[in-house]
Amino acid sequence: MSTDIGICNKNSKAVANELTKILEDEYMLYNKTRNAHWNISGSDFYIKHKFFETQFGQLDEFIDSIAERIRYVGHYSPSTLKSFLELKKPTEMSREKDDWQGFIKELLCDHESIIIKIRKNIRHFDIDFNDAGSSDFIAGLKQGHEKMAWFLKSHLQ
């Protein structure tokens, strides 16, 4: 049964495709943040371990809400690792030393990349696809990433 929410099928498919790209980025960032949580070491291990745990928890909520948004617009959410590994950014971590500064710098870069991608889509969803709901949704998602990026950046100052 198709969904009739006032967005033509062509536009809902385009929105779902763009949301899927964001979902893939979120999933990779979630895994990278979990890796930081698992592999952090050093004198402030516990504080950073808990910090990364909070961050991957927030990303888990983002992932769930994006997958559900794809369903709201009438399409199925991808959930295979193969589809998530086909993306280009963010990439998997490839450092030899798992220090907190390296983790934070790399995660900050990934958050900034996602923020830029989302920012480009906000008006696109509303104007081109006639989907103000998805536009508002990703604007909120962008704000969540901005706050997470601020927290990461604050550790480097």
Image (cartoon, helix red, strand yellow):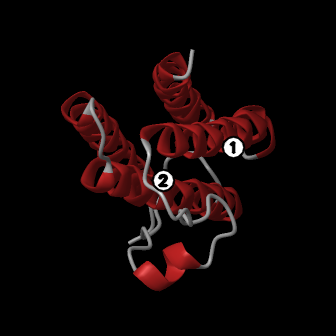
Picture quadrant of residue 21? bottom right
- Compare marks 2 and 1 and give the one earlier in the sequence: 2
Q: Residue furthest bottom?
A: 82
Disc 2 residue type (three-letter): Leu
User: The residue tagged with tag 2: helix, strand or loop?
Assistant: helix
Residue 130 appears in the picture as rendered: no
Label 2 crowd bin: few (<14), some (14–19), many (20+), radius 10 Å: many
Disc 1 residue type (three-letter): Ser
User: The residue tagged with tag 1: helix, strand or loop?
Assistant: helix
Picture quadrant of residue 47? top left
* Up/down of 135 relative to 110, above or below: above
- Residue for point 40% across, 80% down: 80
- Residue for point 56% across, 66% down: 94
Cα–Cα gap, marks 2 and 1: 11 Å
Q: Nearer the viewer, residue 62 or 100?
A: 100
Residue 1 position, x and y percent, is: 38, 72
Label 1 crowd bin: few (<14), some (14–19), many (20+), radius 10 Å: some
- Residue for point 78% across, 38% down: 120
- Residue for point 44% across, 59% down: 27
Q: Specify the quadrant that holds the C terminus.
A: top right
* Up/down of 133 relative to 36, above or below: above
Q: Nearer the viewer, residue 134 or 100?
A: 100
Q: Is residue 1 left or right of residue 112?
A: left
Counting labels gives 2
Which residue is under mark 1?
Answer: 113
Could you say which disc has been placed on residue 36 in the image? none
Residue 67 appears in the picture as rendered: yes
Residue 72 position, x and y percent, is: 41, 52
Q: Nearer the viewer, residue 3 or 145?
A: 145
Residue 49 position, x and y percent, is: 24, 39
Residue 23 position, x and y percent, is: 50, 57
Which residue is under mark 2?
Answer: 29
